[in-house]
Amino acid sequence: MSKIFNFSAGPAMLPAEVMLQAQEEFLQWNGTGVSVMEFSHRDPAYVKMAQEAEQDLRELLNVPDDYHVLFLQGGGRGQFSAVPQNIAAKTDTVDYLDCGTWSGYAIREAEKYVSQVNVVGAAEQTEQGKRIQPASEWQLSNNARYFHYCPNETVDGIAIHDIPDVQAPIVADMSSNILSAPLDVSRFGVIYAGAQKNIGPSGFAIAIVKKSLLGQPQPEVSSIMDYQLQAKDNSMYNTPNTFAWYLSGLVFKWLKRQGGLAGIGELNQRKASALYDYVDASDFYRNEVHPDYRSIMNVPFQLADDELDKHFLEQAHQAGLVGLKGHRFVGGMRASLYNAMPYEGVEALIDFMREFERTHG
Ligand code: PLP
């Protein structure tokens, strides 16, 4: 079979090396003759692996000691309710920047738990394309318990590249850009991410939480979403997703071998630039996001005639380029270029796009 490049927005492509290692170890983990999925999470060998995964993640992101690193369940959306329940009281005010589709879901979830959810700004259309209102226009509260934003909106392909300069502790939904470039964790109160793009299997989630933000959670918070309880039990208050934790650990080791976040960040920039440069130079394809707000991870693009979308997708699939269909809210195409996508995959996509333009343009 010829090489397949999977551009899906998530669950997404994982590094080939990791998949091969997982395949080899599937039935025989750690030389035991037992699958890693059959191992008790209390077994010393498993605990050692789990702790090493946390340590590797801490090293990759240079996480300061005054932060918990939690391995949770319930994916990215689970954190939409965990955040307000753990770090705000019902009567608090919280600020949310409405960056796009996922921010909207986060806002609606927060409204269930906090009485004042203040939407400080939103995405907007400009002559140069879609962007997020600049910080100078945000209507920030002066007493916000936290400020929430999504630095990379997966559906819309919109990103905020600079960490916002706000007074309140910053909470970031990094589901689709975590570990994609170096990051100053100390600027954040909470960073969370569903795992299925840059980390591992779906359903799993990571939360990096500044300890000083945790006081009393809201009384109704479910125990498995209680950050303090999970931290006390090393994220094993209930049985964790042992396989996802294991696989994520392999991904962290793979990332270290790629030169850590500096190495992968440089590669990610090169991949995205190559695709945006090609789209910008073509009259047949277009990207509708303002150049300063373009995502490095998710590149949406439209064809000159959307009647051709179906043919594009079919032929791309035949050429081994899968998962390119844009989100149903946006239409067109979307190429997700997460960490595991090699440069070669982007080159193959551009070659295919060029040939499709030649034959259909
Ligand atoms: N936040 C962002 C930015 C996402 O892209 C996604 C899913 O794709 C989610 C949250 C929701 O994650 P999950 O489906 O794991 O709940």
Image (spheres, rainbow, N blue to C red):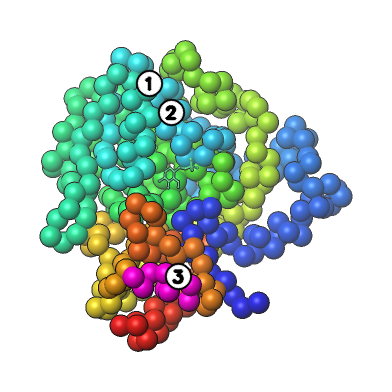
What amino acid type should be assigned to the residue bearing mark 3?
Leu
Query: Which of 173 and 48 lies nearest the eye of the viewer?
Result: 173
Name the mark on residue 27.
none
Residue 90 falls left or right of residue 336: left
Residue on which the image places disc 3: 313
What amino acid type should be assigned to the residue bearing mark 1?
Tyr
Tag 2 and tag 1, C-beta contact below 8 Å:
yes
Q: Magenta residues?
A: 307-315
Query: Which of 76 and 271 lies nearest the eye of the viewer?
Result: 76
The residue positioned 29% from the left and 59% from the top of the image is 294
Residue on which the image places disc 2: 81
Instruction: Give the percent coordinates (x, y) of residue 68.
Output: 51, 32
Q: Look at discs 3 and 2 and give the one toward the viewer.
A: 3
Residue 164 occupies which quadrant of the picture?
Answer: top left
Where's the C terminus, which quadrant?
bottom left
In the image, residue 71 sits, relative to residue 153, either above or below, namely above
